[in-house]
Image (cartoon, coloured by chain):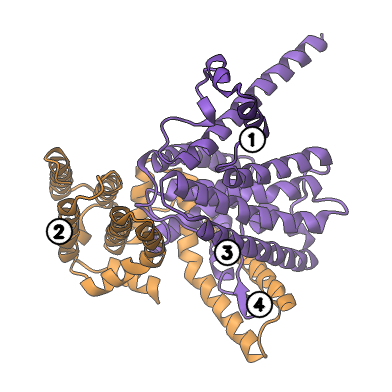
Chain colours: A orange, B purple
């Protein structure tokens, strides 16, 4: 499945994988802001963004075509509005909608596909996100697959029994709710028994290598130089 | 309904991000306070439950099916502030892992779906959750949550200058209306089954404080979001009467206000300038009324 592939990718090794999650997150945000505030109708700017993304994708040593395919998930939405703009006679906006949204999605994908989720969330937390929210996201991501599989099994079982009707679908979701609720209580008790004190420690605590700092400095330098020279 | 990056104009996404960060931080703190520490695992697993529940499709007749969005259901079981946190977490996972919605646009999506959607969905239950209108309140909550977030999303896209011909706008509104009705029906069905299984899961609403207040609040929310879309080009009655009588030109010199002609000057497309100005005007009127009523009450009480 889609997300399982992402998990496998995040566990590989490459120059981009080895960089600190905080550094990647900061550079991602700066890059997204740069794209978000890019002036429209500048083909060379989009070429520059595309080449930055290409370099990063090559450094990640992930299959480029599959990366592109996943980033293209944003296209149905973007293409609809691009078509509307194009029909309204605004071809510039149409192009910028498609390019901006797909470049942004590709950048997010690259960072998420090269960083294991716990490290990524720890980085988000160290960048001053509310602790409670980050913890909820952590649990959500952990049990997403478990509960989705359960829902799929229930759905398949219902199909085998002759399909689902409106009345029984409400019941099915209520059963899922009940079992999720019970599971959450069990999880919490088990975690308390293992010494959970309100925080999830990382197996490999992150430390800033000099390579991380130079990566951050280079990234910021390239982006601000590009903006200063009116390229980006 | 998730806005990707690159769609919103810079002032729009920046302002919504700046609004969403303190709002979610505040609500997260509130949902944490006064509750046992089992909260984070519970909320996370319930978020995963919403993801999983979206895999179960509801047949809605004529070959179509819909699925649960979940904001209202969570608000009526876990409480509104916890539901906001769970929906925010869901949107964050969707933006990071599923490329569904942008990262810079996360603030906009959170404000539309997690904050406004959940609170609008909880409002009817809060006021009519105990009484003869209970089932209607839950249904209305589901409908409102989807409608309010859809209207806000469309409005933000239009402020950002995405061209939307009226035919497309009408079509998407019709689609949103259908999915809102589906959400209401699904929420009601799941809610009924849950209550039968264990009444303890269902939150006790605050009770019928004042039906009138609830009706006014729900109606006002719907009208404000609907009105934003309807009031695009129509001059109001007073203005057209003034134009007919020829006092139009003179009136401008009398009232030199910052909301001149109900348009804010900084927003780009004309259509949304009026809506933004209308909302600012509403806020100003609200603040004036609140100040006035407080002053009156203070004068009367001693």
Q: Chain of mark 1?
A: B
Asked if both marks, 3 and 1, belong to the same chain, the answer given is yes
Dot 4, crowdedness within 10 Å: few (<14), some or many (≥20)?
A: some
Judged by depth in the image, the label closer to the viewer, 4 or 1, is 1
Q: Which residue is mark 3?
A: B50
The label shown at residue B59 is: 4
Chain at numbered mark 4: B
Residues flagged by tags 4 and 2 on a common chain: no
Report the mark closest to the observer, 3 or 1: 1
Q: Nearer the viewer, residue A129 or A80?
A: A80
Q: Residue at x 21, y 47 (%)?
A: A208
Q: Please identify, in this view, whether the residue under mark 1 or under mark 2 is nearer the observer.
A: 1
Please tell me the numbered disc located at residue A167: none
Give the residue at the far right of this rendering: B132
Helix, strand or loop for disc 2: helix
- Give the residue at mark 2: A51
Decide: is A168 above or below A78. Answer: below
Front one among B291 and B127: B291
Q: Are marks 4 and 1 in contact (CB under 8 Å)?
A: no
Local packing at callout 2 (Cα closer than 10 Å; few below 14, some 14-19, many 20+) is few
Residue A93 or residue A51, whichever sits in front: A93
**Badge 3 or badge 1: first in the primary sequence:** 3
Where is residue B217 drawn, in percent x and y?
Answer: 72, 40
At x 57% / y 69%, what residue is drawn?
A: B54
Q: Secondary structure at mark 3?
A: helix
N-terminal label among 4 and 1: 4
Secondary element at image label 4: strand
Q: Is residue A223 left or right of residue B113?
A: left
Q: Which residue is mark 1?
A: B236
Query: Alpha carbon of mark 4 to alpha carbon of mark 1: how far?
Result: 43 Å
Residue mark closest to the camera, 4 vs 3: 4
Separation of disc 1 and disc 2 at Cα?
52 Å
């Amino acid at each position: 499945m889609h997300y399982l592939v992402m998990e496998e990718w995040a566990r590989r090794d490459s120059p981009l994988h080895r960089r600190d999650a905080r550094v990647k997150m900061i550079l991602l945000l700066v890059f997204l802001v740069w794209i978000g505030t890019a002036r429209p109708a500048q083909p060379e700017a989009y070429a520059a963004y595309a080449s930055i993304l290409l370099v990063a994708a090559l450094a990640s040593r992930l299959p480029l075509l599959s990366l592109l395919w996943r980033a293209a998930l944003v296209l149905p939405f973007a293409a609809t509005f691009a078509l509307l703009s194009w029909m309204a006679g605004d071809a510039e906006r149409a192009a910028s909608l498609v390019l901006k949204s797909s470049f942004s999605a590709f950048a997010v994908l690259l960072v998420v596909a090269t960083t294991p989720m716990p490290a990524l969330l720890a980085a988000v937390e160290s960048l001053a996100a509310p602790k409670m929210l980050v913890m909820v996201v952590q649990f959500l991501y952990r049990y997403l697959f478990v509960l989705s599989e359960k829902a799929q099994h229930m759905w398949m079982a219902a199909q085998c029994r002759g399909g689902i009707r409106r009345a029984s679908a409400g019941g099915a979701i209520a059963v899922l709710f009940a079992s999720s609720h019970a599971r959450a209580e069990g999880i919490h008790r088990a975690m308390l028994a293992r010494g959970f004190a309100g925080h999830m420690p990382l197996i490999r605590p992150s430390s800033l290598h000099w390579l991380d700092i130079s990566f951050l400095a280079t990234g910021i330098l390239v982006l601000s130089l590009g903006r200063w020279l009116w390229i980006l | 309904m998730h806005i990707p990056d690159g769609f919103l104009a810079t002032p729009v996404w920046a302002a919504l991000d700046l609004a969403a960060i303190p709002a979610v931080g505040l609500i997260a703190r509130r949902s944490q306070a006064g509750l046992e520490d089992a909260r984070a695992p519970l909320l996370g697993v319930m978020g995963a439950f919403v993801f999983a529940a979206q895999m179960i499709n509801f047949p809605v007749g004529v070959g179509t099916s819909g699925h649960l969005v979940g904001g209202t259901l969570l608000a009526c079981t876990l409480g509104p502030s916890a539901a906001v946190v769970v929906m925010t977490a869901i949107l964050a996972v969707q933006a990071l892992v599923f490329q569904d919605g942008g990262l810079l646009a996360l603030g906009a999506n959170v404000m539309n779906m997690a904050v406004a959607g959940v609170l609008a969905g909880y409002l009817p239950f809060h006021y009519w959750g105990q009484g003869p209108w209970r089932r209607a309140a839950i249904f209305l909550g589901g409908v409102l949550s989807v409608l309010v977030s859809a209207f806000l999303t469309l409005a933000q896209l239009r402020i950002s200058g995405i061209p939307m011909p009226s035919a497309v706008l009408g079509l998407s509104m019709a689609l949103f209306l259908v999915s809102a009705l589906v959400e209401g029906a699904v929420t009601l069905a799941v809610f009924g089954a849950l209550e039968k299984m264990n009444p303890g899961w269902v939150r006790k609403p605050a009770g019928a404080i004042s039906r009138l207040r609830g009706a006014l609040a729900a109606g006002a929310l719907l009208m404000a979001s609907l009105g934003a879309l309807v009031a695009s080009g129509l001059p109001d009655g007073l203005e057209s009467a003034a134009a007919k009588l020829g006092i139009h030109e003179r009136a401008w010199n009398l009232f030199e206000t910052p909301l001149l002609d109900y348009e804010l000057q900084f927003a780009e497309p004309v259509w949304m300038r009026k809506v933004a100005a209308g909302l600012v005007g509403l806020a100003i009127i609200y603040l004036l009324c609140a100040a006035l009523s407080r002053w009156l009450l203070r004068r009367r009480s001693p």
